[in-house]
């Protein structure tokens, strides 16, 4: 596979972004690096595991190479295997052991993997020409030296995301992207050697790297607890977690649950990072009732194609500025230092459009900078459609821009307001409706903890349906549903009001923690 290697702000080889991790391992090898369900793995041992993987995979070459498959089970071994592949200057593709075998085989085929790293003795074992089986034992030997520098454009990982056509698209992210964003996330999240960071997300998604890389390059401790998804506050208490990165949908449910139970966040927690979905303004109001003023609440925004996080803003807690008046919407924030942005109005369907600075008009957010992906694996048409080579020349060569597909506008303070996605807009009775607007209207109704809107076919025509998780210990469901419909009728046009509003115990989520609207619809409506 060969992808374009445009100038995105770096060119010469630079020290490996994992140097700080190996430096901590050499300086303080006994320091705890990962606590995996109670099992403590030191920095020295983790560095040895990573170095063993790096030595076992094929060396990096100047010629294009397929990524190395890494079987992931949400364990310290996953972390070591990914670090090892990255230290070797290679790229990895995660293989989630819990997925169906057919999906894993398709990933291997699409990525062209010839080698893989097994992180467990049993269960899924990839059928590849070279299967690496490391020895996962504690080591007291002198930790290895730092890895060799890597060309910035060398691929670091490939993640296959769901495509609108059903065929997964492999996003290829280079080493320069991680070198740009990891130090900034350390500073943004306040990660230093005193912190304990929860490893909440599975390694099948890139949000896991927000947890792993800033933590281990700062000398901090990463905590893995399989029960964190169902007993979050207990895990935070037991492990004295100070920083957590959560899907916004999970945070919505957490806030509602804490209020229902009349409890607070554990005292160890000082920074809570959320992202992946729009923040509901009503949940931010509820957060204020939790007596959590000591906790920094950060809202983040990014995409797989732009490597982890591009925008952030403090919503509450120490250092948070007053939020702008944005008509009830919650900002996604300001660009991080390595990010350039422009808001583009499409001109008569022209994808490139034209930049503008009208704060009253929505436009598509486009992003530039060193964190941009190389493109889509073996998919030049999709790459050309989303990554624009035409653009401004600031003296360092033509700048590439990534079309996020997200509609935004600029708030009075300069932060961006998320206004929805083109692919979340549907036509109902001839009107264009954004599913996010429907969710916002229902979500602010008393008694609603969470909401997901979708479309279904009704006599051959699209119709709206909403699924709601209702607050516990409140009035009967029928009363809440009647009030929701009454409030919608009083506040919204008829085409925005769902024909069905269905109470459900839970939603279906993607492997990255986002609410899967269509899968939720299919589960409850068939």
Image: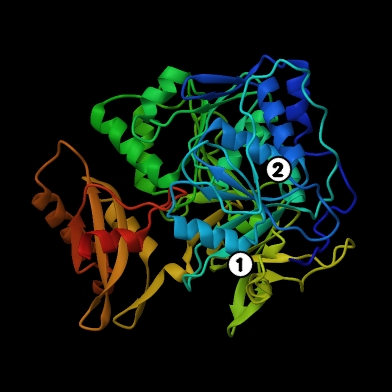
Question: Which of the 4 quarters of the picture holds residue 377?
Answer: bottom right
| Residue at 63% from the left image edge and 58% from the top image edge | 305
Q: CA distance from mark 2 to mark 1?
A: 45 Å
Q: Quick one: label 2 or label 1, which is nearer the N terminus? A: 2
Residue tagged 2: 85
Q: Which image quarter: residue 383? A: bottom right
Q: Which mark is residue 358?
A: 1
Horizontally, residue 282 falls left or right of residue 419, namely left
Name the element at disc 2: helix
> Left of 414 or right of it: where is 444?
left
Labels 2 and 1 touching (C-beta < 8 A):
no
Q: How many marks?
A: 2
Residue 421 position, x and y percent, is: 48, 66
Secondary structure beneath dot 1 equals: loop
Is 99 left, or right, of 308 in this rendering? left
> On the rendered structure, is 156 left or right of 475?
right
Residue 96, placed above or below residue 355: above
């Amino acid at each position: 596979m060969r992808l374009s290697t445009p100038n995105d702000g770096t060119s010469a080889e630079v020290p490996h972004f994992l140097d700080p991790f190996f430096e901590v391992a050499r300086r303080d090898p006994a320091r705890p690096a990962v606590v995996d369900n109670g099992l403590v793995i030191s920095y020295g041992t983790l560095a040895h595991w990573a170095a063993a993987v790096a030595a076992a995979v094929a060396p990096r070459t100047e010629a294009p190479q397929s990524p190395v498959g890494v079987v992931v089970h949400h364990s310290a071994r996953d972390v070591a295997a990914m670090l090892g592949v990255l230290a070797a200057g290679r790229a990895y593709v995660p293989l989630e052991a819990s997925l169906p075998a057919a999906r894993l085989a398709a990933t291997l085929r699409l990525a062209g993997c010839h080698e893989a790293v097994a992180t467990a003795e049993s269960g899924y074992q990839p059928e590849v020409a070279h299967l690496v089986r490391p020895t996962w034992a504690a080591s007291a030997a002198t930790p290895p030296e730092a890895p060799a520098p890597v060309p910035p454009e060398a691929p670091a990982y490939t993640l296959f995301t769901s495509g609108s056509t059903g065929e997964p698209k492999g996003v290829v992210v280079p080493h320069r992207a991680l070198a740009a964003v990891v130090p900034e996330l350390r500073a943004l999240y306040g990660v230093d050697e005193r912190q304990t960071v929860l490893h909440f997300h599975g390694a099948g998604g890139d949000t896991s790297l927000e947890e792993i890389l800033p933590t281990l390059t700062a000398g901090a401790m990463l905590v893995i607890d399989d029960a964190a998804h169902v007993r979050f506050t207990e895990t935070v208490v037991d492990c004295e977690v100070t920083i957590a990165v959560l899907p916004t949908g999970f945070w919505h449910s957490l806030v509602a649950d804490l209020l229902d139970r009349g409890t607070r966040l554990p005292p160890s927690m000082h920074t809570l990072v959320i992202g992946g979905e729009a923040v509901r303004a009503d949940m931010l109001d509820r957060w204020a009732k939790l007596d959590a003023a000591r906790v920094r609440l950060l809202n983040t925004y990014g995409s797989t194609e732009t490597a982890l996080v591009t925008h952030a803003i403090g919503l509450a807690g120490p250092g948070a500025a007053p939020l702008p008046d944005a008509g009830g919407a919650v900002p996604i924030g300001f660009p991080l230092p390595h990010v350039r942005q422009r808001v583009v109005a499409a001109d008569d369907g022209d994808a490139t459009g034209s930049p503008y600075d009208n704060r009253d008009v929505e436009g598509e957010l486009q992003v530039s900078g060193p964190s941009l992906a190389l493109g889509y694996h073996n998919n030049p048409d999709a790459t050309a459609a989303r990554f624009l080579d035409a653009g401004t020349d600031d003296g360092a060569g033509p700048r590439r821009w990534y079309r996020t597909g997200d509609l935004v506008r600029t708030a009075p303070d300069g932060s961006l307001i998320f206004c929805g996605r083109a692919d979340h807009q549907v036509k109902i009775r001839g009107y264009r409706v954004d599913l996010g607007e429907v969710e916002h209207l229902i979500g602010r109704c008393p008694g609603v903890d969470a909401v997901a809107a979708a479309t279904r076919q009704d006599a051959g025509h699209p119709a709206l349906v909403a699924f709601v998780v209702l607050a516990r210990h409140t009035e009967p469901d029928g009363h809440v549903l009647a009030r929701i419909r009454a409030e919608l009728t009083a506040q919204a046009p008829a085409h925005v009001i769902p024909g069905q509003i269905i109470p459900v115990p839970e939603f279906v989520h993607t492997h990255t923690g986002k609410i899967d609207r269509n899968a939720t619809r299919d589960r409850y409506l068939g």
